[in-house]
Amino acid sequence: MGVEHLRILGGRMSDNRLADIKLFYEILTQIEHSNGGGRLLSHCTGRMDWPLRGIYFIREPQEVRRETGEGSRIVRIRTHPTRPGSKTKLWGLLSQHRGNAKDGGGNHRGSIFRLRVGAALIEKDGAQHPTWGQDSSATPEIRKTEQPIERNVSDRIGKMTVTWLAVPDKPGPESLRAYIEKNAIALLSNFGNPPLDPPSPGWLGYYCNIDLIGKSGLWPPCNRS
């Protein structure tokens, strides 16, 4: 099971969403096993065997499936940019999310995932960090004040596990990666659908200022980094 199975599933989603999600997880479990299991993000490095191009699927601790089977649920699906000419690779995107392995910091301005997780942590803690998410760059002084939050974000994301599907297509409008990503998100998202495998009551995503995250049950379900 692999690329072709997910492509076919994306093109044949039935009116039985529950059955389709169960099938999705069956396929993903096979992919995960063939990869040697999910990898803890805090332990991931660029020296590991990563495909140049592909899609990643992230599971979050304590976020368990309820209606569709056992195990943790997927909370984020993403591929690297599919615009023509893009040179971003799969590990490059994951490393932005994971943050700096040396000091536990990171740069939320280069990762929408880090941005949203950080915003949720700030809201949950009732803290005030007015520079978080402001502008596309920041001075060294501002970055220094933000590092405690960046380290908290790295710690949170680092506890998540990732598996991946290698899809060696070239970036472009007919990208198979984009097709699988779009349909997988549509299948798992609870936004506008009767909830299946809803987030736990205390899920951090509920604290984010993006309503779509809480309603979908997925970290940034939008088509960004």
Image (cartoon, rainbow, N blue to C red):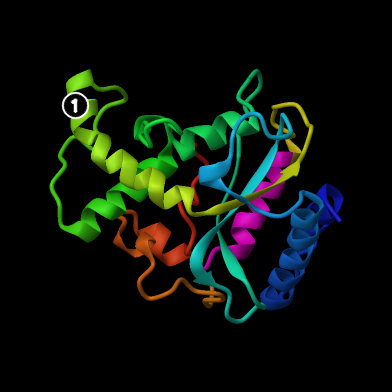
- Residue 84 relative to residue 139: left or right: right
Q: Residues in magenta?
A: 177-190
Give the camera-side residue of 149 and 132.
149
Which residue, as the protein is rendered here, is positioned at the far front?
Answer: 102
- Name the residue carrying label 1: 142
Residue 206 seen in the figure? yes
Magenta: main secondary structure: helix
Does residue 110 sit above or below 157 in this rendering?
above
- Where, by quadrant of the figure, is residue 183 drawn? bottom right
- Where, by quadrant of the figure, is residue 151 drawn? top left
Does residue 66 sit above or below 91 in this rendering?
below
**Residue 181 colored in magenta in the image:** yes
**Residue 220 colored in magenta in the image:** no
Which residue does the image show at 76% across and 51% down from the upper left?
Answer: 36
Percent of width and height locating residue 64: 54, 73
Q: Callout 1 environment at 10 Å: few (<14), some (14 to 19), or many (20+)?
A: few
